């Protein structure tokens, strides 16, 4: 991102059409790994993917600017990710990971014990390891899925997705009433909201440990309700 800003400033000042493409960023990464010990200690595969994701995001933003799209439709330039405000995510291509004996082995000698939600239908082409807002880590695999169309039965049903009722159909046997998961958790949600309100930090001051704890409990409850739904 620093390179992107420098190129933009130089192009504006001199009128030259300098570029900041993936190939240049890869060279910069190689140079940075050679002179930065802590960067060289990490695996190069996820670092290369971060650079390429940045390049793709930047290219999309420049394309939107060139097309003169309205501001509300533009993707926007990539921004800095702060440690406390962004959850980590790492992308590994096929040469950066392997699965052996049910464990996920990542580049750099990292072995993870995975709780599998289901078996993988084929060998994955990539995996993204990320952390959600409540501190849980996940591994999302990209696999080639084979579509298997269901047999044609000739039966027809109409479905109306709603709010008070999850689904109303033309067949009473297939109606889905609202499970009311949110209403069940409302008492706890209100309690956590009050805890956050009492411990909310003043403007310009960092959040206290109690505020972060209440915020974590509230996010955890939101996640539970979302999973139930």
Image (spheres, rainbow, N blue to C red):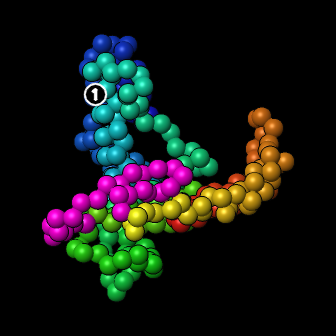
Name the image quarter holding residue 58.
Answer: top left
Residue 4 seen:
no
In magenta stretch: residue 157: yes
Which residue carries the number 1 mark?
A: 63
Task: Name which residue lies at 42% across and 51% down.
Answer: 161
Task: Name which residue lies at 38% across and 58% down.
Answer: 169
* Disc 1, SS: helix
Residue 5 seen:
yes
Task: Name which residue lies at 30% across and 13% down.
Answer: 15
**149 sits to left or right of 127:** left
Q: Vertically, is 153 above or below 80?
A: below
Name the image quarter holding residue 6.
Answer: top left
**Along the viewing direction, whichever of 46 and 204 lies nearer the viewer:** 204
Residue 108 in picture, x, y percent from top left:
39, 69
Which segment is the magenta one?
Answer: 143-171
Q: Residues within 10 Å of mark 1 (few under 14, many from 20)?
A: some
């Amino acid at each position: 991102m620093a390179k992107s800003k420098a190129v933009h400033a130089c192009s504006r000042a001199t009128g030259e059409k300098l570029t900041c493409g993936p190939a240049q960023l890869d060279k910069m990464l190689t140079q940075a790994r050679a002179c930065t010990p802590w960067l060289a200690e990490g695996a190069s595969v996820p670092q290369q993917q971060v650079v390429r994701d940045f390049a793709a995001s930047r290219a999309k933003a420049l394309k939107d600017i060139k097309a003169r799209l309205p501001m509300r439709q533009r993707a926007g330039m990539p921004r800095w990710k702060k440690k406390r405000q962004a959850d980590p995510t790492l992308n590994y291509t096929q040469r950066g990971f392997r699965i052996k004996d049910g464990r996920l082995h990542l580049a750099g000698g990292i072995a993870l014990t995975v709780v599998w939600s289901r078996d993988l239908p084929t060998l994955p082409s990539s995996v993204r390891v990320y952390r959600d807002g409540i501190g849980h880590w996940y591994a999302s695999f990209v696999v080639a899925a084979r579509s298997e169309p269901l047999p044609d039965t000739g039966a027809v049903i109409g479905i109306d997705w709603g709010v008070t009722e999850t689904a109303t159909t033309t067949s009473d046997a297939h109606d889905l009433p609202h499970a009311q998961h949110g209403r069940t958790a409302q008492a706890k949600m209100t309690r956590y909201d009050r805890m956050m309100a009492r411990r909310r930090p003043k403007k310009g001051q960092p959040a206290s440990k109690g505020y972060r704890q209440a915020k974590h409990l509230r996010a955890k409850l939101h996640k539970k309700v979302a999973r139930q739904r």
